[in-house]
Image: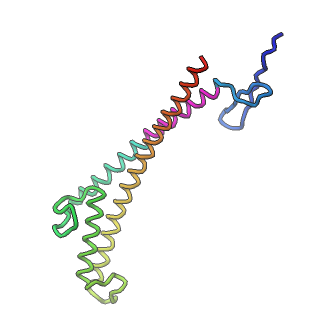
Amino acid sequence: MTDAPRIETEHFGGAGMSETHERGTGAPDAAGALRSSRVAGTLAMVGGLVLILVGIVVWVMVAMQLRAENIVVPDDAMAFQGQVVSGPLTAFVQADIIQHHALEASGGKTYAELAQDDPVRATMMNASFLRASLFTSVVSFGVAAFAIGTGVLAIILGWGLRRLAAARAALQA
């Protein structure tokens, strides 16, 4: 008979998860911890890749839809004059110049400030809808960029977990 500690396995509810401990220590065995770190790192990297791909697809789709509208930034805009609206900056500038032109047409009054029978009210309403649509595009670009950035971060964290597991395995060998 040997004096080596006994190994017990505890099973936790769901998905067949278990953890192996040395009897009396309450500490997980090194092999299980290393395996968990490698799996978590791999999952983080795969999830990061998916986030990056989804973010790129959304960015391209929104840009293509904007480009298909053939909206050209006018010459009196603050930037990007003459360019087709196809990205977050051109969409933002176009929304800004739409507001400028609408306020010029209404004498500086907003939609809510105009009388109900004022014929300029329809122009202000259309301008408001166009601006909202362009700002929705800007937000979509922001969400896509956030997904891409989160994906990059997940890949870096996953890579770090895998490197730590590899370093610990090398130290134990």
The residue lying toward the viewer, choosing from 20 and 2, is 2
The residue lying toward the viewer, choosing from 110 and 170, is 170
Residue 97 coordinates in the image, percent (x, y): 25, 70
Quarter-wise, where is residue 88 in the image?
Answer: bottom left
Residue 36 coordinates in the image, percent (x, y): 60, 30
User: Furthest residue to the right?
Assistant: 1
Identify the coloring: rainbow
Task: Classify residue 90 as left or right of residue 8.
Answer: left
Task: Classify residue 24 as left or right of residue 44.
Answer: right
- Position of 102 relative to 154 (above/below): below
**Magenta segment, which residues?**
32-50
Quarter-wise, where is residue 89 in the image?
Answer: bottom left
- Position of 156 relative to 141 (above/below): above
- Position of 83 relative to 163 (above/below): below
- Quarter in which the C terminus is drawn: top right
Magenta: main secondary structure: helix
Q: Tell whether position 96 is magenta.
A: no
User: Which residue occupies 83% across, 10% down?
Assistant: 1
User: Which residue occupies 50% across, 38% down?
Assistant: 157
The residue lying toward the viewer, choosing from 135 and 81, is 81
- Position of 93 relative to 118 (above/below): above
User: Which residue occupies 23% across, 76% down?
Assistant: 101
User: Which residue occupies 32% across, 64% down?
Assistant: 134
Quarter-wise, where is residue 122 in the image?
Answer: bottom left
Residue 58 coordinates in the image, percent (x, y): 36, 50
